[in-house]
Image (cartoon, coloured by chain):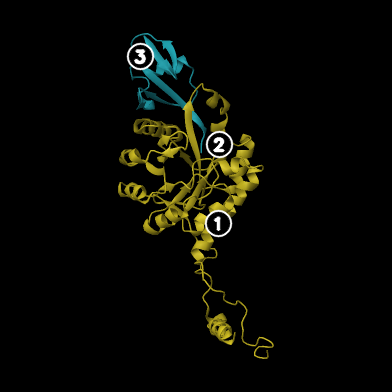
Amino acid sequence: MRVMVNQKEYDLPHQSMVSDALNLIAAKPPYAVAVNLQFVPKSQHAHYPLNENDQVEIIAPVTGG
Amino acid sequence: MKMIKWKLLRRSQAVNFTTALMTAPLPQTLNRADPLVLYGESFASRLLLGTSRYPSPQVLETAVNTAKPAMITVSLRRQGSSTTEAHSGFWDLLKKMAVPVLPNTAGCHSPQEVITTAQMAREVFETDWIKLELIGDDYTLQPDTLRLVQTAEILIKDGFKVLPYCTEDLILCQRLVDIGCQAVMPWAAPIGTGQGPLNPYAMKLLRDRLKVPLLVDAGLGLPSHACSVMEWGFDGVLLNTAVALADDPVAMAKSFAMAVDAGRSAYLSGAMKPQTSAQASTPLVGTPFWHQS
């Protein structure tokens, strides 16, 4: 299935979880995740199923004003 | 001429210096513990410092160590982007500096973006503090004042300690307080402009009407700007660009820290009221040659 991870398109097997998307881009901690603009807590990464055309955002800390 | 001299004489005689010296109370502002209190937490400094746009991480670290801010602001961006790649050592630097962090929601244009970003920030930075930024106009970076209050209310109900970046509009700030913001952060001028307070009247009015802590966020360019708003009774300032883009950010960080302290001290000291006519500072009694001419 087609999933967008940080605005890039990926093919993931059906029944993939958020943790699969994290592995796909080799996400480095610390990070946090949102799917379709909804926050997905760390405790749910291994159990939160992804669907076709989902938009996954994986973020990291940066400087800010 | 003599009439004027008499008026001045009477004013200058108002204090008997000898007796006043013996009975005057000690200055209460000296060394008085005067923490900034936000949401029940006390901070020794009234300066909040941004972490962006410094020439190098080393300069940022030295500036923070020099200014000793209450909090430093941080943000979130996509992993794998050029921004996060350039900030790969930032997390380690944050841990090293060990200063409380205030995550922001910079760049968010909708309430849902703000809420999700805040929740992600809470997990990453392990803090309930959030600097609420909801941008309504990309050119001025003016906050979306029409949706700011409802967004702040959602965050507060979700357990966040919300510091909303807002304009100096009294009613907006009042509404933010009404829904539970225990402090508000009006701008002095648009972010990054360094213009200083563009609407002193409204800012002073805000100070007069609202009893919650007020932090000036954005638009300050000089330590004198920070000192002025502190003299007006604002409780703190948050700035970034004015320090980061100075020729010597470390020296400027120190200058701002001193300006904030000076302004606060002046506010607590109780400034004299401006007068329309001159009043001699030097005692007139005993002025040589008086009444001779």
Q: Position of residue B57 (x, y in %)?
A: 61, 35
Residues at marks 1 and 3, CA–CA distance in whole angstroms:
53 Å
- Looking at the colours in the rendered structure, which chain would you say is drawn in cyan? A
- Looking at the colours in the rendered structure, which chain would you say is drawn in yellow? B
Tell me if B201 is positioned left or right of B8 in this view: left
Q: Quadrant of the N terminus of chain A?
A: top left
Q: Name the residue type under label 2.
A: Ser
- Mark 3, secondary structure of its residue: loop
Tell me the residue at 39%/34% (across/down). Answer: B118
Q: Chain of mark 2?
A: B
* Viewer-proximal residue among B124 and B131: B131
Task: Please determine whether, in this image, residue A26 is positioned above or below residue B71.
Answer: above
* Viewer-proximal residue among B269 and A24: B269
* Viewer-proximal residue among B34 and B240: B240
Tell me the residue at 56%/59% (across/down). Answer: B262
Q: Is residue A30 visible?
A: no
Q: Position of residue A34 (x, y in %)?
A: 38, 25
Residue that badge 3 annotates: A53
- Mark 2, secondary structure of its residue: loop
Task: Please determine whether, in this image, residue B216 is positioned above or below residue B31.
Answer: above
Q: What crowding class fits label 3: few (fewer than 14 Cα within 10 Å), some (14-19), or many (20 or more)? A: some
Q: Name the residue type under label 1.
A: Asp
Q: Which badge, 2 or 1, is on the more N-terminal residue?
A: 2
